[in-house]
Amino acid sequence: MKTPEAPPLAPDCLSSDQAPTSARLSPQASRMDKNTDPELMPLPSEGDDPPLVFPDPMASPAVSQELGEEDPASLSTSLETGFGTPSELSPRIKEQELSENVSLLAEETNRAELGPGETMEGVSAEPAREDEDSTTWNYSFSQLPQFLSGSWSEFSTQPENFLKGCKWAPDGSCILTNSADNILRIYNLPPELYNEGEQLEYAEMVPVLRMVEGDTIYDYCWYSLMSSSQPDTSYVASSSRENPIHIWDAFTGELRASFRAYNHLDELTAAHSLCFSPDGSQLFCGFNRTVRVFSTARPGRDCEVRATFAKKQGQSGIISCITFSPTQPLYACGSYGCSLGLYAWDDGSPLALLGGHKGGITHLCFHPDGNRFFSGARKDSELLCWDLRQPAHPLWSLSREVTTNQRIYFDLDPTGQFLVSGSTSGAVSVWDTGRSEHERTPEPVLSFLPQKDCTNGPAP
């Protein structure tokens, strides 16, 4: 993805008080537009007005004092479907109330999917022609995947340097990795993959970009509307210990902007989880008992504060992962307090609180149908499937080996048919979600051992 003609951009080095009041960049902007306004990030579709400021209705006085003296900001969204705000979020929600809230949410919205729906490349994948402008991929796991290429030399220069996960770009063009040396790397796919014909030998993959963080990386993610055909949408967000949230240019590797969160002592505090909203207008960040929402058009410290725990009720613990529903205006949060929370996108009002894991939640993933989502936890062998229409209990449970505190990722293929997960033993398991609907503990349709070490980041 690296383009030699792109000029270097100065990193964001402004102090919190000197943060730019406006840093807008349209996804359709040209490279000249990007150079004249280099502060970052695609502009939300709402317009040029800054976010409106509202008080946070959930935060109690004690919580407000803990979060800081500044008034939290509430960001308006373009969602057409609204939600009623429950009075309180009880840690024990009755099955009937919980089911009614989320079932009503699932029925009252008929919005189209918000996911980008881009082309994905994968092993043993065959394109299914639907129309000339879109391409989907049908995966087949009837046989073991074929090894194509890898990267080893890059991680052998330092002792005990290991990978902590990898994530496909939304358009499927490249891979983002995180490792113990606190460096984010971007890999382009081997060019041989684009050549049809006889089988070729693939060279070892070499990163095209390296982005160095200052300390242990807590989380990282792609910009949700990223497309290699539009360089002004190619961004990566990362959060590391005792550092601001950084936005990196995925074409040049330069630091483009920073988002800063401060505690009640006006000390910088790091986010433990990151997730861009599906429309790209907001960056959701998880903290202790709090989710902070930044406008991607305005770097700096201004944000909306959404407390997840107030008056001894709600979702406690560090918010360790966040994911959005592709079809409904809601998002799910997992915490190290072993709980799952569902919240309305527009104002963060709580919808449901779920509990079923023995360990802290480390990863969440929504099914493309928007009705089901999956959750996994550390030191917990269960990978649970939840149905928003009947959220009181898990729909079914999958078994995988997770014996450490590592974040073991899992993911669905673009069609949502197959769920793939790694394990601490190195084994990769694949489940057919269509066949699993009528089974309490479905068995994987394929299991294989790609390496004799922990496999923490499979991504179809």
Image (cartoon, grey):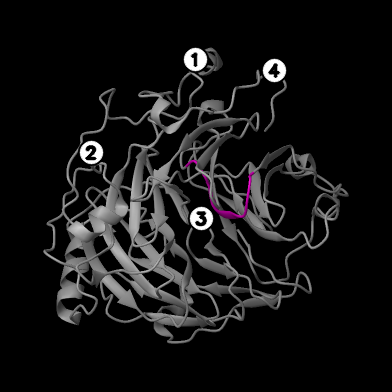
Q: Give the amino acid type for the residue marked by disc 4 in the picture.
A: Glu
Counting other residues with Cα less than 10 Å from the Cα at mark 2, is it few (<14), some (14-19), or many (20 or more)?
some
The part of the image, by quadrant, that contains residue 91 is bottom left
Would you name the residue on which mark 4 appears?
A: 5
The boundaries of the magenta stretch are 213-223
Q: Give the amino acid type for the residue marked by disc 3 in the picture.
A: Pro
User: CA gap, disc 4 to disc 1?
Assistant: 15 Å
Q: What element carries label 1?
A: helix
The disc label shown at residue 76, or none: 2
State if disc 1 and disc 4 touch (CB < 8 Å): no
- Quadrant occupied by the C terminus: bottom right
Identify the residue shown where x is 57% and y is 65%. Answer: 409
Does label 4 or label 1 sit earlier along the sequence?
4
State if disc 3 and disc 1 touch (CB < 8 Å): no
The part of the image, by quadrant, that contains residue 261 is top left
Identify the residue shown where x is 31% and y is 47%. Answer: 112
Query: Between tags 4 and 3, which lies in front?
Result: 4
User: CA gap, disc 2 to disc 3?
Assistant: 29 Å
